[in-house]
Image: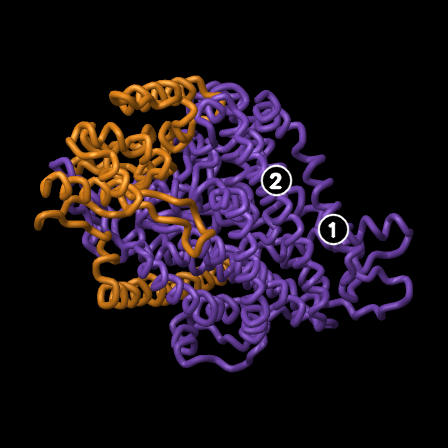
Chain colours: A purple, B orange
């Protein structure tokens, strides 16, 4: 069997596994966010918070909950890193500098997991497990909660009430993320991922002498890092590191983990709005884009254009033998089309076009299938844009899921889709225009520009992967990327929740002969087209200067 | 004004309390529970899959090593590996890739040199390695810099050199390589591979025996 066929079979196996999980997980999540029963452990948690989980919140109260919880997260994580030097269980590692601590705190709270530090030489047990890994859980749960609030806005009418933020967030952790992460972590250990607290220790070498390694709670962090579409690695090499991702099977398993919740949420959405077919239409849109991107990536990586790869006889630079070109290509596309940003191979050493595909995946807004929660709400915003475009074509007031898309709704959706491109393009332009940021580049020419464009694309879209040649541990990059992550996460949430509030207050419009049937393949086609055209128009000039220039030259 | 300030403080307090409670659950109980299960059921794996030879730990089957003498099978290059620059009382290996692009002049130079080196080192008496026989993994660095594996093709072209330097027959060494070649998982997941450390341990044992 050739490597191409093996890659295609891995893709089919992955699709099969995702299909098997789709209905049970989607149904389970719908039940989690519809149930009015509280688990005993959840009652303790609510008592600890001092919140009544049965209080319905309007969008402003829901948003205040999101912001207060996230602000506390940033503050706590920042302080934890700043006092690392005196914390027990820190392996003697010193405090993280203020700019890097700010960047890292923001990065993990916003579900980005951009890392300007080297995991193995900077973060001790306490910061890794009680700081970073905790945000892997709760930032993912916040994302799902906001998506669920938007879905309730569609599902409910004549009320501005969107549910209770504390209940939604806590349930996401206790009933979805924790059980999945526990099982996944044990599977990863069984395959060779490490899980211990041995700290830094010497291990003998074959030719004599010894090496020093970090031991740590790697598998438990690896599991939630994929399930929560976070992506921050315990080690610098992330999921390319054999102690995080030891075998070809764990590689496929990790890709499954990072895709499973975002895809299954479309089922949850369908159930909650009372039509699973609406969920299938969204799923089909996500699946079409994801599959198309995987096919393109495999094609360009197997073709290995680029002088160094032609000379080597394959695009193996930055890729592990055990995963191969196929496994690495599927991982790269899946991690950039979700908000994960974990990597099992280094995107900077992909072919020029391959690197462009990873960037374009993020530029689409990470909606195919996107991050936990953020993928669904991002895609629903695009659906609103698509019905608006369709409405303009036929001259009817656009509707989606029985709700009118009026002036207020379309303004909020438009604001949503303008935020990340504005952040990416303005900050990348500023970095290129200023004299010093360019010194951080490892590569020159088109690829050097791509390093910077990739960094802001990754930060503003809360992805976290990188063209890692860029030395991002400078005050300029720590600060500006931190701001991009913050605004790129929370401004869209403001618009999503405002939209949810305004949709929930409407009364439903009856379906008539003139209603655009949004559960039909025609709509899926329209939606895919709208996504590609809007992103294409926004980013084409920037992509032409970077990955397209590099890819077409080779 | 005062009212909104006190509201904000109250809300931040709730956020902080929520974070602390969830930290206990997901940042303390969860990792400890996983560690307990891992240490009880998969002790060797949870601690890094260490391999011993003649009673001494010689590394991990998962972590590739550099610095093998030419008597042994060579791993992939690791031009992206680093040394730690903070907390320097440790000598930690920093995993990582070169992050060089396909048109990067340095990478082109490294690949050229690596290829010439592989051809030169492995061409033994009566056996010439052609540049076209050198597989891509032999001349490129992995993503982690710690890739424990090489492709079977790269192992194959090293057989003659290793046999000659250890006074073994080519057939003996080739059999060793074949025995240590792992196919794709379930026939289609990943790529066929040879674990360099395990192969070299087996080679050392064979040399000691003969």
**Quarter of the image where one finds residue A531:** top right
Q: Is residue A64 visible?
A: no
Chain ID at mark 2: A
> Up-down: is A522 above or below A212?
below
**Badge 1: how crowded within 10 Å, few (<14), some, or many (20+)?**
many
The answer to whether A512 is drawn above or below residue A461 in the figure is: below
Query: Between tags 1 and 2, which lies in front?
Result: 2
Measured from the top left, where is residue A234 in percent x and y? 33, 48
Which badge, 1 or 2, is on the more N-terminal residue? 2
Q: How many marks?
A: 2
Return the x and y of residue A217 as percentages of the image width and height: 28, 56
Can see residue B52?
yes
Residue holding disc 2: A296
Please tell me whether mark 1 sits on a helix, a strand or a loop. Answer: helix
Identify the secondary structure beneath mark 2. Answer: helix
Residue at image mark 1: A527
């Amino acid at each position: 069997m050739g490597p191409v066929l093996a890659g295609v079979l891995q893709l089919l196996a992955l699709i099969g596994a995702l299909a098997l999980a789709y209905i049970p997980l989607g149904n389970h999540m719908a039940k989690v966010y519809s149930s009015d029963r509280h688990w005993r452990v959840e009652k303790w948690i609510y008592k600890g918070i001092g919140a009544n989980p049965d209080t319905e919140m309007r969008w402003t109260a829901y948003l205040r909950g999101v912001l207060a919880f996230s602000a506390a997260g940033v503050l706590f994580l920042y302080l934890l890193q700043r006092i690392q030097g005196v914390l027990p269980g820190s392996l003697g590692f010193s405090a993280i500098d203020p700019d890097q601590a700010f960047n890292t705190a923001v990065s993990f709270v916003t579900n980005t997991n951009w890392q300007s530090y080297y995991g193995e030489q900077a973060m001790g047990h306490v910061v890794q497990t009680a700081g970073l890994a905790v945000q892997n859980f709760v930032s993912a749960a916040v994302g799902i909660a906001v998506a669920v609030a938007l879905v309730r806005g569609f599902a409910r009418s004549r009320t501005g009430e969107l549910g209770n933020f504390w209940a939604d967030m806590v349930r996401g952790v206790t009933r979805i993320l924790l059980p999945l992460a526990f099982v996944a972590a044990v599977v990863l250990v069984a395959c060779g991922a490490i899980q211990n607290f041995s700290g830094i220790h010497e291990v003998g070498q074959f030719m004599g002498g010894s090496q020093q390694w970090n031991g740590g709670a790697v598998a438990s962090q690896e599991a939630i890092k994929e399930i929560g579409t976070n992506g921050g690695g315990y080690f610098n090499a992330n999921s390319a590191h054999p102690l995080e991702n030891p075998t070809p099977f764990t590689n496929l398993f990790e890709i499954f983990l990072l895709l499973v919740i975002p895809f299954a949420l479309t089922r949850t959405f369908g159930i909650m709005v009372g039509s699973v077919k609406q969920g299938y239409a969204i799923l089909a849109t996500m699946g079409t884009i994801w599959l198309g991107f995987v096919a393109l990536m495999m094609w360009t990586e197997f073709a290995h254009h680029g002088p160094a790869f032609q000379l080597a006889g394959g695009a193996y630079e930055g890729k592990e033998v055990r995963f191969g070109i196929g496994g690495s290509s599927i991982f790269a596309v899946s991690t950039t089309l979700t908000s994960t940003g974990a990597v099992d191979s280094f995107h900077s050493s992909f072919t020029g076009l391959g690197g462009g595909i990873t960037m374009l995946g993020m530029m689409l807004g990470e909606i195919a299938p996107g991050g936990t929660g953020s993928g669904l709400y991002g895609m629903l915003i695009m659906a609103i844009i698509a019905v608006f475009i369709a409405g303009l074509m036929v001259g009817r007031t656009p509707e989606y899921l029985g709700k009118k898309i009026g002036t207020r709704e379309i303004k909020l959706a438009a604001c949503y889709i303008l935020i990340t491109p504005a952040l990416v393009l303005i900050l990348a332009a500023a970095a290129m225009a200023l004299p010093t940021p360019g010194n951080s580049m490892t590569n020159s020419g088109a690829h050097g520009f791509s390093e910077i464009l990739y960094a802001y694309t990754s930060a503003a879209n809360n992805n976290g992967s990188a063209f890692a040649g860029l030395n991002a541990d400078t005050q300029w990059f720590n600060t500006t990327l931190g701001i991009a992550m913050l605004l790129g996460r929370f401004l869209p949430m403001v618009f999503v929740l405002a939209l949810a509030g305004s949709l929930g207050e409407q009364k439903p419009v009856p379906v008539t002969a003139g209603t655009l049937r949004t559960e039909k393949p025609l709509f899926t086609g329209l939606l895919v087209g709208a996504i590609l055209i809007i992103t294409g128009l926004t980013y084409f000039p920037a992509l032409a200067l970077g990955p397209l220039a590099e890819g077409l030259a080779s | 004004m005062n009212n909104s300030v006190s509201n904000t403080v109250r809300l931040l307090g709730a956020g902080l309390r929520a974070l602390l409670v969830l930290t206990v659950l997901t940042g303390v109980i969860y990792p400890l529970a996983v560690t307990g299960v891992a240490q009880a059921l998969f002790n060797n794996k949870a601690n890094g899959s260490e391999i011993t030879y003649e009673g001494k730990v010689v590394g991990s089957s998962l972590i590739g090593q550099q610095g093998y003498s030419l008597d042994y099978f060579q791993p992939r290059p690791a031009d992206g590996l680093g040394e730690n620059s903070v907390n320097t009382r440790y000598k930690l290996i920093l995993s990582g890739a070169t992050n060089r692009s396909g048109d990067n002049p340095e990478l082109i130079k490294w690949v050229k040199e690596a290829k010439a080196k592989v051809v030169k080192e492995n061409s033994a008496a009566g056996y010439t390695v052609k540049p076209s026989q050198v597989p891509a993994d032999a001349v490129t660095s992995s993503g982690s810099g710690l890739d424990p594996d090489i492709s079977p093709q790269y192992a194959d072209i090293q057989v003659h050199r290793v046999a000659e330097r250890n006074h073994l027959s080519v057939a003996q060494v080739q059999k060793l390589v074949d025995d240590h070649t792992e196919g794709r998982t379930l026939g289609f997941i990943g790529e066929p591979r040879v674990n360099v450390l395990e192969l070299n341990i087996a080679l050392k044992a064979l040399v000691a025996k003969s």
